[in-house]
Amino acid sequence: MEYFKGILCGLAAILVAEFVFSWPTLRTQKATGVAVLRYLLLGSVFSPRFWIVGILLFGLFFAASRGNTVFRVLFFWIPTLTVSALGFLIIAMYAYLFTISRHQ
């Protein structure tokens, strides 16, 4: 279970950091489609600010996973499961749109 908590903390931290830094860029970006995704992913992977926020969020989630029951539920289970589910849904949506667009 500890491995699962660590993986969930890392995934949630990366997705939250990606969303935090991509939201202002999405509002000002003129590109459409896959070009936006490539710009957002490459821009965040090479940004030290993204990794600092990701590491801090990972530490917060990981520390919350070891706290008392109320602290664990409020600051670990609810945020990490919500963010992970939304991240997987967005990835699944893009995969579905990609496969549908290839058949037409």
Image (tube, grey):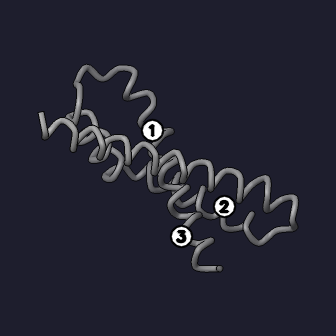
Task: Look at the picture and state if 34 lies above or below 48.
Answer: above
Task: Look at the picture and state if 8 lies above or below 83.
Answer: below
Q: Which label's residue is closer to the chain start, 3 or 2?
A: 3
Q: Which residue is mark 2?
A: 61
Q: Residue 101 falls in which quadrant of the image?
A: top left
**Mark 2 residue element:** helix
**Mark 1 residue element:** helix
**Mark 3 residue element:** helix
Q: Which mark is residue 21?
A: 1
- Residue density around tag 1, few if under 14, some if 14–19, many if 20 or more, within 10 Å: some
Q: Residue at x 62, y 48 (%)?
A: 82
Q: Residue furthest front?
A: 103
In percent of width and height, residue 11 lies at 50, 60
Foreground of the two, 70 or 97: 97
Separation of marks 2 and 1 at Cα, in angstroms: 19 Å
Separation of marks 3 and 1 at Cα, in angstroms: 21 Å
* Mark 3 vs mark 1: in front: 3
Q: Residue at x 54, y 50 (%)?
A: 85
- Residue density around tag 2, few if under 14, some if 14–19, many if 20 or more, within 10 Å: many
Q: Which residue is mark 3?
A: 7
- Quarter of the image with the N terminus in it: bottom right
- Is 84 left, or right, of 90 in this rendering? right
In percent of width and height, residue 61 lies at 66, 61
* Dots 3, 2 in contact, CB < 8 A: no
Q: Which label's residue is closer to the chain start, 3 or 1?
A: 3
User: The disc labelled 1 sits on which kind of residue?
Assistant: Phe
User: The disc labelled 2 sits on which kind of residue?
Assistant: Phe
Q: Residue at x 67, y 60 (%)?
A: 60
